[in-house]
Amino acid sequence: MERAPVFSSNLVSVGYEEETQTLEIEFKNGFVYQYAGVPLDEFNSFMNADSKGTYFNARIKHYPTTRL
C-alpha cells in the first residue's frame, strides 16, 4: 500500500485502501500498523484533523490492528 507523508509528532506516513477499508500508518519508531474496517469518512476525518496523533488515540487505535 502506498503511504503519503503527514505532518505529525508521532506519525510518518499514512495510506488507505478504500476497497478493504484498511488504514496503514507508519510511526516515527519505525513500526507500521494496519487498522481494519476503517470507513472512508473516518479516514477523511483523520486526515483533516488538526492533530493526527490526538485523533488516532481517540478514534483509530480501537480498530483491529496488525503490525507489519
Image (cartoon, rainbow, N blue to C red):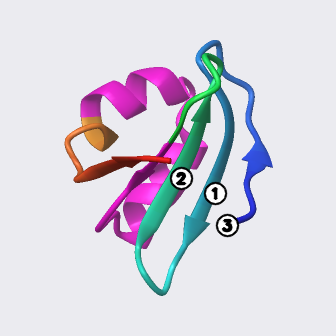
Q: Which callout, 1 or 3, points to the residue nearer the camera?
A: 3
Structural distance between the alpha carbons of marks 1 and 3: 7 Å
- The reply to whether dot 3 and dot 2 touch (C-beta < 8 Å) is yes
**Dot 1: within a 10 Å radius of its alpha carbon, few (fewer than 14), some, or many (20 or more) residues?**
some
Mark sitting on residue 24: 2
Q: State whether the magenta stretch is mostly helix, strand or loop.
A: helix
Q: Earlier in the sequence, mark 1 or mark 3?
A: 3
State the mark number for residue 1: 3
**Of helix, strand and loop, which one carries label 1?**
strand
47 vs 15: above or below: above
Q: Amino acid at mark 3?
A: Met
Q: Are circles 2 and 1 on residues that touch, CB within 8 Å?
A: yes
> Residue 29, how many percent across, how many down?
60, 16
Amino acid type, label 2: Glu
Whether residue 37 is situated above or below residue 53 in the rendered picture: below
Q: Residue at x 53, y 36 (%)?
A: 49
The secondary structure type at the circle numbered 3 is loop
| Residue 26: image location, x then y, percent | 62, 37
Looking at the rendering, the stretch of residues picked out in magenta corresponds to 33-58
What is the x, y in percent for residue 1? 67, 66
Q: Which residue is mark 1?
A: 15
User: Is 19 one of the magenta-colored residues?
Assistant: no
Viewed as shown, does residue 68 lie left or right of 2?
left
